[in-house]
Image (cartoon, rainbow, N blue to C red):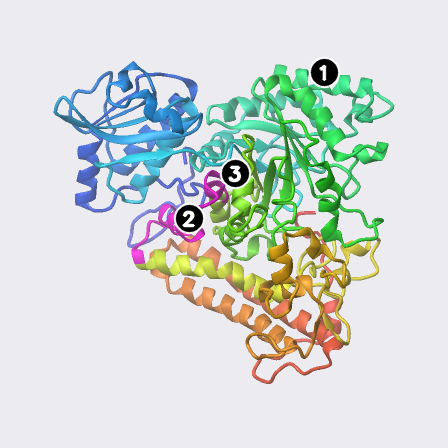
């Protein structure tokens, strides 16, 4: 990326070399390999023509010039009109471009899509990149750059692309003191103390990276909100960030603390039906728009985990969301109201509570409200069934919330490609309107004809030099952006593209590393929570195994609440004979998942309390299968480790060493998870761990006594 480095001299064959530190992410504009391909690009990129000079087009122009010079080794001359074959014309559709592409061809592109076509005019061959807006131009330029990065030909292009989801945002759980809740890559990027006077150039690189994968919004602050962000002293800092991000098509959003009218407004109540409160929020919205004219809106966590909300005043979620939506609507702002709500005082299965509270409110929200729903009904576990709210509220736009940061998947020390998790959820069939009613169709609005749609990702970004802590953590940021743009994309193809852009290695490397990445999510499920187990991690900090966790202030913050192991078996009965959470899904799912013989075994213990001696599809008993899966997870980490070690000659030494060290930690912790969980569950099963498996390194008491201080992310 564009920044000044100190050069680290390395004695490699007597030559100095800059160490690769991961800062450039997937925007590695390396020189094109191969004389034939290099000649092809030079023949088809002879000159650049930019008919207009808007702010977003200027950002695209600057990016394209930088990328082409780096990849081709020469600066491409700019002209005011086409003078020779091989020209590239880039601009918002105008009379100049209409000579090559009629305006009617852009109708399907909307506000953010683009066209790239190879055309012939006056005997000259040229490439035209056009769109209806500057944002479309920006996305089109990044698409063209990545095509060149991937080594694809550009002489016969006919590309038409547009995002399928309208609002594509990162949720930063960043606090004003620069700590990051569930953040594992350093402190927050936002240097509030030095803003607005000092605008770190890194903010530009952050915006470039997001724009390159189609992300068009960022929520700057933690959902466990601080009302101070809405005060003038902070709004002027927000405005400085918004000015940077605006150049790359990114809107700024803020988290709104529901009790802000009391905390910073001097009111005695925050009741959403109170006229003074409603007026306060309208005036606050007007104030924010004076600082940030293109402000995107509010993200709200209310009446969950102690956060204030409308239920404090006997009101419902629609009352609270609509109050804020009313304040934002005149300026086009939206409210993203989170459905992550649960209360241990409610005597029901935690997995049921969001559906119970929100389903009756379908159709009661204003048109500029999105209900932001986590991918599963508990909390970003290594594997969950899709959330039952998807498909259950046809009159209300539903917004996906994925977690990119690995709160429950080993933090930034475990290699876990989340593209596979994201895609698994998006491809799940809700059966809301019959077979084929996938979560993706709910999210993009196509199932119920919603114009407003959205996808959010809880960011894994911090101020670490490589942004995400683990080098492969960058792939999860990249995959989120790609799937937010097109939730029907292939997780495997996205992994392969990221590898090519990041490492630029050969086909054998890309194939083996793609396979490794696709294996990684299944590995972590196996060594942490196989067969539908969930929420059995360490208490509060969520580091390491803790299936024995009990006797905490809230039952739904303990592990025993979820696995319910006893002498008969293990698992949470969510069928009609248990909590009946399964009733919240469509009849087709209820029928399949309600039967131990037909439920996919990956969800078995999520929905059923199963006898230790129950025979599974493998022919093994449940206890034997648990032992098998936990050990398989460890073996899969070893396989990942071996795959990586074989690539030593194809990866720069710094990256190879860093990933190797992290994989060693991951293997150690995978064994820790396996041993601790099997020893604990063995106290209920009273069955031996089969002889073929490695025996636990310590006894159960050793694992239960482990204590950890200053764990990151809390």
Res 384 seen here: no
Q: Please say whether residue 419 is one of the residues in the magenta stretch.
A: no
Q: Nearer the viewer, residue 638 or 330?
A: 330
Label 3, label 1: how far apart the Cα atoms are:
32 Å
Q: Where is 609 relative to 537, above or below?
A: below
Give the x, y percent position of residue 129: 31, 27
Magenta portion: prevailing SS class: helix
For marks 3 and 2, give the CA distance: 19 Å
The numbered disc on residue 283 is: 1
Lower sequence index among marks 3 and 1: 1
Q: Which mark is residue 494?
A: 2
State the image coordinates of residue 145 (x, y, percent, origin top left). Answer: 33, 36
Percent across and percent down for residue 494 are: 42, 48
Q: Residues within 10 Å of mark 1 (few under 14, many from 20)?
A: few
Q: Nearer the viewer, mark 3 or mark 2?
A: 3
Q: Mark 3 against mark 1, which lies toward the viewer?
A: 3
Q: Which residues are magenta?
A: 480-507
Please indicate, yes or no, whether residue 100 appears anywhere in the rendered image.
yes
Displayed quadrant of residue 527: bottom right
Per the image, label 2 sits on a secondary structure element best described as helix
């Amino acid at each position: 990326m564009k920044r000044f480095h100190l050069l680290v001299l390395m004695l490699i064959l007597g030559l100095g070399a800059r160490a690769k530190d991961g800062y450039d992410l997937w925007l590695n504009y390396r020189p094109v390999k191969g004389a034939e391909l290099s000649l092809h690009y030079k023949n088809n990129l002879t000159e650049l023509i930019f008919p207009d000079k808007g702010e977003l087009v200027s950002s695209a122009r600057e990016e394209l010039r930088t990328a082409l010079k780096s990849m081709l080794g020469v600066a491409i001359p700019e002209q005011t009109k086409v003078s020779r074959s091989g020209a590239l014309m880039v601009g918002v559709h105008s009379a100049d471009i209409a000579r090559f592409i009629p305006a009617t061809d852009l109708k399907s592109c909307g506000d953010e899509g683009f066209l790239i076509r190879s055309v012939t005019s006056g005997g000259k061959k040229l490439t035209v990149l056009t769109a209806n807006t500057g944002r479309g131009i920006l996305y089109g330029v990044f698409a063209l750059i990545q095509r060149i990065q991937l080594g694809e030909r550009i002489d016969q292009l006919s590309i038409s692309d547009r995002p399928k989801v309208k609002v594509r945002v990162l949720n930063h759980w960043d606090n004003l003191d620069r700590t990051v809740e569930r953040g594992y890559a350093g402190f927050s990027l936002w240097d509030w103390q030095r803003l607005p006077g000092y605008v770190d150039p890194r903010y530009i690189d952050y915006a470039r990276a997001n724009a390159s994968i189609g992300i068009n919004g960022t929520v700057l602050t933690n959902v466990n909100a601080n009302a101070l962000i809405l005060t003038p002293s902070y709004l002027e800092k927000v405005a400085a960030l918004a000015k940077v991000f605006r150049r790359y098509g990114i809107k700024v959003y803020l988290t709104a603390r529901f009790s802000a009218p009391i905390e910073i407004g001097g009111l005695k109540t925050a009741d959403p039906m109170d006229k003074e409160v409603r007026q306060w929020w309208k005036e606050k919205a007007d104030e924010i728009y004076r600082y940030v004219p293109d402000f995107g809106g509010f993200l709200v966590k209310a009446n969950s985990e102690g956060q204030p909300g409308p239920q404090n005043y006997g009101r419902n979620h629609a009352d609270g969301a609509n109050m804020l939506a009313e304040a934002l609507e005149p300026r086009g702002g939206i409210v993203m109201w989170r459905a992550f709500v649960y209360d241990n005082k409610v005597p029901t299965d935690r997995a049921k509570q969001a559906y119970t509270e929100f389903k009756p409110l379908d159709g009661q929200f204003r048109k500029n409200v999105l209900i932001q729903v986590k991918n599963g009904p508990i909390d970003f576990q290594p594997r969950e069934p899709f959330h039952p709210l998807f498909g259950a509220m046809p009159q209300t736009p539903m917004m996906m919330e994925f977690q990119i940061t690995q709160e429950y998947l080993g933090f930034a020390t475990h290699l876990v490609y989340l593209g596979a998790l994201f895609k698994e959820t998006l491809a799940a069939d809700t059966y809301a309107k019959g077979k084929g009613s996938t979560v993706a169709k709910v999210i993009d609005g196509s199932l119920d004809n919603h114009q407003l749609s959205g996808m959010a990702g809880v960011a894994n970004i911090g101020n670490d030099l490589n942004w995400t802590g683990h080098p492969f953590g960058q792939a999860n940021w990249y995959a989120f952006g790609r799937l937010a743009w097109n939730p029907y994309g292939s997780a495997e193809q996205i992994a392969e593209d990221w590898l090519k852009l990041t490492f630029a290695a050969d086909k054998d490397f890309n194939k083996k590393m793609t396979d490794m990445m696709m294996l990684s999510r299944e590995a972590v499920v196996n060594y942490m929570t196989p067969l539908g187990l969930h929420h059995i991690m360490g208490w509060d900090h969520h580091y390491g195994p803790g299936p024995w966790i009990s006797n905490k202030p809230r039952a739904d913050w303990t592990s025993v609440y979820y696995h319910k192991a006893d002498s008969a078996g293990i698992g949470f009965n969510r069928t009609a004979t248990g909590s009946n959470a399964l009733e919240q899904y469509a009849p087709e799912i209820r029928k399949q998942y309600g039967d131990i013989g037909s439920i996919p075994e990956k969800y078995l213990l999520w929905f059923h309390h199963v006898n230790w001696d129950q025979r599974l599809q493998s022919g093994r008993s449940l206890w034997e299968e648990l032992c098998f899966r936990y050990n398989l997870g460890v073996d899969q980490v070893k396989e990942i480790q071996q795959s990586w070690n074989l690539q030593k000659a194809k990866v720069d030494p710094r990256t190879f060493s860093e990933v190797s060290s992290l994989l060693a930690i991951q293997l150690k912790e995978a064994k820790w998870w396996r041993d601790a969980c099997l020893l604990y569950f063995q106290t209920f099963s009273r069955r031996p761990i089969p002889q073929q498996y490695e025996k636990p390194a310590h006894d159960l008491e050793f694992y239960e006594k482990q204590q950890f201080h200053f764990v990151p992310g809390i």
